[in-house]
Image (cartoon, rainbow, N blue to C red):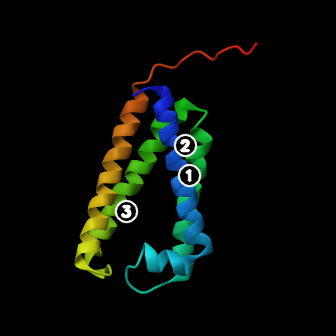
Amino acid sequence: MSERTLRIVVALLGLYHLLTGLLALFAPGTFFDEIGRYGAENPHYVGDVGAFTAAYGVILLAAVRCPSWWTPVLLVGAAWYAAHAFNHLLDIDEARSDARGTLDTILLAFGSAALSWLAVAASRLKPQPARKRS
């Protein structure tokens, strides 16, 4: 994967996490109803999740111009998604349906694998010297 492609992926991941986090933080009821319906609704905890998710989006966006950050930031995301998938596995029967609980768990595990793969790709990049502006 080229540095340019990975930079775009990191930027898109950053935007996705920032927007998802802001939704959960500022519209916890909507987030709960449309995305995270597990157990009883608790707007405070949904907002907490939104704050964490938005913060991850911000650090991804900050990393766009710092390729040396990509591997550690992506690895943190991979660990987070793995833990998140495990939590969903424990509460799989709390989802709005068994199919949704299973799908969410699988998608989060896939997200962890994808972030791990991206971290490996980032670690293999050869740093390019900065271009001089004329």
Nearer to the camera, 65 or 73: 65
Residue 107 picture location, percent across and down: 31, 59
Q: For numbered disc 2, what is the local secondary structure? A: helix
Contact check, label 1 and label 2, Cβ < 8 Å: yes
Residue 11 is marked as 2
Q: Quadrant of residue 75?
A: top left
Gap in angstroms between the C-alphas marked 3 and 2 = 22 Å
For mark 1, what is the residue?
15
Residue 84 is marked as 3
Q: Nearer the viewer, mark 1 or mark 3?
A: 1
Q: For numbered disc 3, what is the local secondary structure? A: helix
Q: Earlier in the sequence, mark 3 or mark 2?
A: 2
Residue 111 picture location, percent across and down: 35, 52
Residue 52 appears in the picture as rendered: no
Q: Is residue 125 above or below residue 102?
A: above
| Type of amino acid under label 1 | Leu
| Type of amino acid under label 2 | Ala
